Image: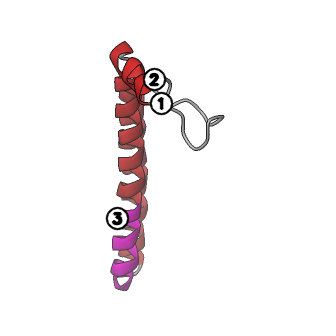
């Protein structure tokens, strides 16, 4: 079973190691932006906190898709999916 993002014609989910590397890279980029925003104006803490939570939620979705992609390569899962339909 191939896991895709979005709709049936969406992009195939990258292998889990690639997904995790992309997550780490994005976190580094976002961390720098969050820190710069706070250094510029500490009163924006609430805004930064919401941005952090939103980013982690998006990244969690990517990791879950990567996990499903890994499990989806297991033939037993494909058989179980076919039996349930």
Q: Name the element at disc 3.
A: helix
Query: Which of the 4 image quadrants contains residue 57?
Result: bottom left
Residue on which disc 3 sits = 53
Q: Is residue 80 left or right of residue 3?
A: left
| Disc nearer the start of the sequence (3/1) | 3
Q: Position of residue 80 (x, y in %)?
A: 37, 23
Q: Nearer the viewer, residue 9 or 22?
A: 9
Q: Circle 1: is it few (<14), some (14-19), or many (20+) Cα within 10 Å? A: few
Residue on which disc 1 sits = 85
Q: Circle 2: is it few (<14), some (14-19), or many (20+) Cα within 10 Å? A: few
Q: Position of residue 47 (x, y in %)?
A: 40, 77
Give the magenta range: 42-54
Q: Nearer the viewer, mark 3 or mark 2?
A: 2
As measured in the structure, the alpha-carbon distance from the residue carrying label 3 to the one carrying label 1 is 36 Å
How many numbered circles does the render carry?
3
Residue on which disc 2 sits = 82
Q: Is residue 7 left or right of residue 40?
A: right
Residue at point 47% right, 22% down? Answer: 1
Look at the magenta stretch and give its main secondary structure.
Answer: helix
């Amino acid at each position: 079973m191939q896991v895709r993002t979005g709709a049936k014609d969406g992009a195939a989910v990258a292998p889990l190691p690639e997904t995790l590397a992309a997550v780490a890279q994005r976190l580094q980029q976002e961390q720098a932006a969050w820190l710069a925003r706070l250094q510029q104006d500490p009163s924006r803490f609430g805004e930064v906190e919401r941005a952090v939570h939103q980013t982690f939620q998006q990244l969690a979705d990517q990791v879950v898709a990567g996990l499903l992609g890994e499990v989806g390569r297991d033939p037993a899962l494909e058989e179980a999916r076919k039996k349930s339909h």
